[in-house]
Image (spheres, rainbow, N blue to C red):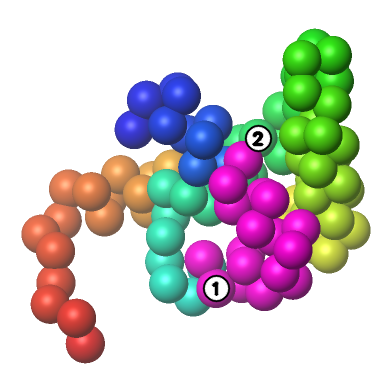
Amino acid sequence: MNKRERWVAGVSLLRDYLRDDLALARTLRERRWFDLLAAVELANKDVDPSLAVTDPALYKALRDAITKFFLRGYGCLDARLLRLKAEKEAKAPHRAAE
């Protein structure tokens, strides 16, 4: 997953989380490590302030989602461990649906 794809996945998940309180919990339960990693990295880096000029609505939505992310306790998620899980899953053969 390249940098742009990670950013798009992180933005998408955080925007979903803003609308649906259980979006991150579902992502954890479904073990979608790449998506979760993208959201955690985006939240930890914070939103680029120049986005406020180019797309104020997206900037506000991301700021609100990141604030909610930390207030609800998701700030404890470790990006390094999520990266390891995502890489491990990418290397492992895919299992049939259980």
Mark 2, Cα crowd under 10 Å, few <14 / some 14-19 / many 20+, is many
Q: Residue at x 84, y 14 (%)?
A: 53
Residue 85 pos. (x, y %): 38, 53
Q: Which mark is residue 26?
A: 1
Magenta stretch, main secondary structure, is: helix
Instruction: Report which quarter residue 60 is drawn in.
Output: top right
Mark 2, residue position: 42
Residue 24 pos. (x, y %): 62, 64
The amino acid sitting under disc 2 is Leu
The answer to whether residue 6 is magenta is no
The answer to whether residue 12 is magenta is yes
Cα–Cα gap, marks 1 and 2: 18 Å
Is residue 44 something that shows in the picture?
Answer: yes
Q: Quadrant of the C terminus?
A: bottom left
Q: Of helix, strand and loop, which one carries label 1?
A: helix
Instruction: Report which quarter residue 39 is drawn in.
Output: top right
Mark 1, Cα crowd under 10 Å, few <14 / some 14-19 / many 20+, is few
Q: Is residue 62 above or below residue 50?
A: below
The amino acid sitting under disc 1 is Arg
Is residue 38 something that shows in the picture?
Answer: no
* Magenta highlight range: 11-27
Q: Residue at x 55, y 73 (%)?
A: 26
Closest to the observer, 75 or 11? 11
